[in-house]
Amino acid sequence: MDTSRRTFLGVAAVTVAQGDLQMHTEPHIHEHSTVPSDTALRVKALESLLVEKGLVDPAALDALIDAFEHDVGPRNGARVVARAWVDPTYKARLLADAASAIAELGFTSHQGDHMLAVENTSNLHNLVVCTLCSCYPWPVLGLPPTWYKSSAYRSRAVIDPRGVLKELGLALPDDAEVRVWDSTAELRYIVLPERPSGTEHLSEEQLAGLVTRDSMIGVARVSAQAPGGKP
Amino acid sequence: MNGVHDMGGMQDMGPIKYEQNEPVFHEPWEGRVYAMNRAMGAWLKWNLDAWRFEIELLPPVDYLLMSYYEKWFVTLQGRVVKYGFVTKEELERGRATEGSTKTTPILTPSMALQMNRGIPSSHDDSIAPLFHLGQRVRARNIHPTGHTRLPRYARGKYGEIFRDHGVYSFPDTNSQYKGTARQHVYSVRFAGRELWGEHASPLDFVHLDMWDNYLEPA
């Protein structure tokens, strides 16, 4: 397996290098899709080469990885949502100019400089997908989960959004509008979920603690109970 | 290009595999691949549209079988050769050729967190929109062989201009370095039944972001 896999990775790389469309006609056969044990080594080899040639600084790579593992993630989006719930003027700014309103809270960087916030109501449910690749609002939600990037989600979210939501545990009433946002351009979307009832006494910070990543993609509701397993 | 990446509306991709408490990166190498793509992108030798097209050019079987970051890795390997950063021999050997130039990394640790995407402002009064809010439009029935952001499932379908997002580079030309052809991008609202027929709920709508060049008056 390793040998065929290695060959295929090498061939694919050369294909890209040559921009060779003819490669499409050559068959590639793989037993399964698990990551080969040598991928880590091959990645390390590429990094060593790029570092040796002074093309990348490994400390910059560390900084990026650390940021996405620890700082940039759905907790940012949750703070945006909680602020919008407690401050109607902030909410109005968020819906009118999401990028600026999000920047007010300090969240600006890659993949989020053009943003649109879309609001769920009792009879309108918004759902975000990228059918063509994996577009996602990094500054407020971090990097996308695997299921969001999967063929299954990308393909069916537009043709059967209610079925997809049901599969992910969210049943919608038949009389609710479903609005799917296919991120085909450079706009990035964040769903402003409904504030659950029974949370009137909670502080902004406590509210942020309830907001999940999935609710900001539009595949879950926010529950008045602190989230369990789902992020 | 009518490729497998353009999968909106396909139905045979199986159940959605949801992972509880998913880590940001499943393996350390995934993080290195992500970060190397960002760091090499900072050289500004390629644009985002060209970057996306290279992933779309992977052979379809590979596209479906490879994990997300495998695609990022394989295309990065090809790209650093294609754009002249390393030679094919260096890539194969994993070592720089003796006497080859050593440069200084462009992405520093302090810059790493401040990068934006380099997408210019979408406000540009000098470029007039071709369509107006509420206007009924048809997505053109075209099949470009290069990179395009007009999904097959919307081609030939009728919708309505819902929002004007402002002015953006046109991916079809920008991906080939044939000009940015900046033009308006709109959120176009399509009824589920227009896209998928009578089995769709009358209350399903799909909004796609579409450039002027993808649209014609209905």
Image: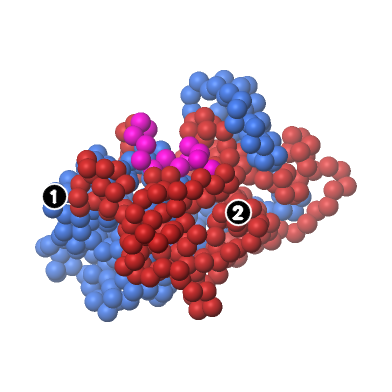
Q: Is residue B180 left or right of residue A99?
A: right
The magenta segment is B1-13
Is B9 contained in the magenta span? yes
Tell me the red chain: B
Q: Is residue A162 left or right of residue B34?
A: left
In three-dimensional space, the C-alpha distance between marks 1 and 2, rounded to whole angstroms, equals 42 Å
Q: Residue at x 28, y 76 (%)?
A: A92
Name the foreground residue: A70 vs A17: A17
Q: Main secondary structure of the magenta part?
A: loop
| Residue type, mark 2 in image | Ser
State the image coordinates of residue A55 (x, y, percent, origin top left): 72, 53
Q: Which shade of the palette goes to chain A?
A: blue
Residue pushed farthest front?
A: B218
Q: From what the image shows, is residue A183 above or below residue A167? A: below
Q: Residue at x 48, y 52 (%)?
A: B149
Scheme by which the image is coloured = by chain
Neighbours of disc 2 within 10 Å: few (<14), some (14-19), many (20+): many
Residue position marked by numbered label 2 in the rendering: B175
Residue pushed farthest left?
A: A198
Residue position marked by numbered label 1 in the rendering: A173
Depth check, mark 1 against mark 2: the one in front is 2
